[in-house]
Image: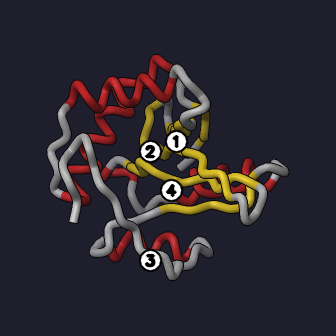
Amino acid sequence: MNITIRPATESDSAIIAEFNILMAKETEDKSLPSDRVHHGVEALLTDSSKGIYLLAEANAEVIGQLMITYEWSDWRNGNFWWIQSVYVREESRGKGVFQALFGHVRRLAQERKDVCGLRLYVEKHNKQARNTYEKLGMKQTDYLLYEIDFVMGVSV
């Protein structure tokens, strides 16, 4: 499969929102409100300070995506790039789509002096995703993630 990676544009908002909704349902059994997701995607696509989406294409069709957001580290004097909103169409899985997206992100990050590393979080029961990330050289950290979600409700 010949996979190309490109930055998303505003015209990609519908497919990105669709992928985000599918990913939430599949990985966490969450039904996200379509309108809110569309507005969230559009907000990022019109404000690059929030992050960027990268899309994987094959045969002129979007088959995968990921989003990069930024976290400043005063300890490292650089930004961590957080990989989020990862989704690959079901029929394209196991064909190197995420590997192509990840490789692209890694190269972009390593070319920049202001990026100190890559991070992501994964649903703890998603063993297939965890195995994929580990095969690409990522390691589980000692950190636990805590949150209070003011939009979707308090998380425990």
Residue plotted at (42% across, 51% down): 86
Residue 69 in picture, x, y percent from top left: 55, 45
Residue plotted at (55% across, 54% down): 82
Callout 4 amino acid: Phe
Q: First in sequence: mark 1 or mark 2?
A: 1
Query: Mark 1: few, some, or many residues within 10 Å (few <14, many ≥20)?
Result: many
Q: Residue furthest bottom?
A: 142
Q: The residue tagged with tag 1: helix, strand or loop?
A: strand
Q: First in sequence: mark 1 or mark 4?
A: 1
Q: Is residue 147 left or right of residue 133?
A: left
Callout 3 amino acid: Asn
Q: CA distance from mark 3 to mark 2?
A: 18 Å
Query: Mark 2: few, some, or many residues within 10 Å (few <14, many ≥20)?
Result: many
Residue identified by numbered label 3: 131
Callout 1 amino acid: Ala
Residue 129 in picture, x, y percent from top left: 40, 68
Residue 98 in picture, x, y percent from top left: 50, 56
Residue identified by numbered label 1: 56
Q: Which mark is residue 15?
A: none
Query: Mark 3: few, some, or many residues within 10 Å (few <14, many ≥20)?
Result: few
Q: First in sequence: mark 3 or mark 2?
A: 2
Q: The residue tagged with tag 4: helix, strand or loop?
A: helix
Viewer-proximal residue, 21 or 49?
Answer: 49
Viewer-proximal residue, 95 or 86?
Answer: 86
Q: The residue tagged with tag 3: helix, strand or loop?
A: helix
Q: The residue tagged with tag 2: helix, strand or loop?
A: strand
Quadrant of the rendered structure where residue 38 is?
Answer: top left
Callout 2 amino acid: Gly
Whether pointer 3 and pointer 1 mark residues with C-beta atoms closer than 8 Å, the reply is: no
Residue identified by numbered label 4: 98
Q: CA distance from mark 4 to mark 3?
A: 12 Å
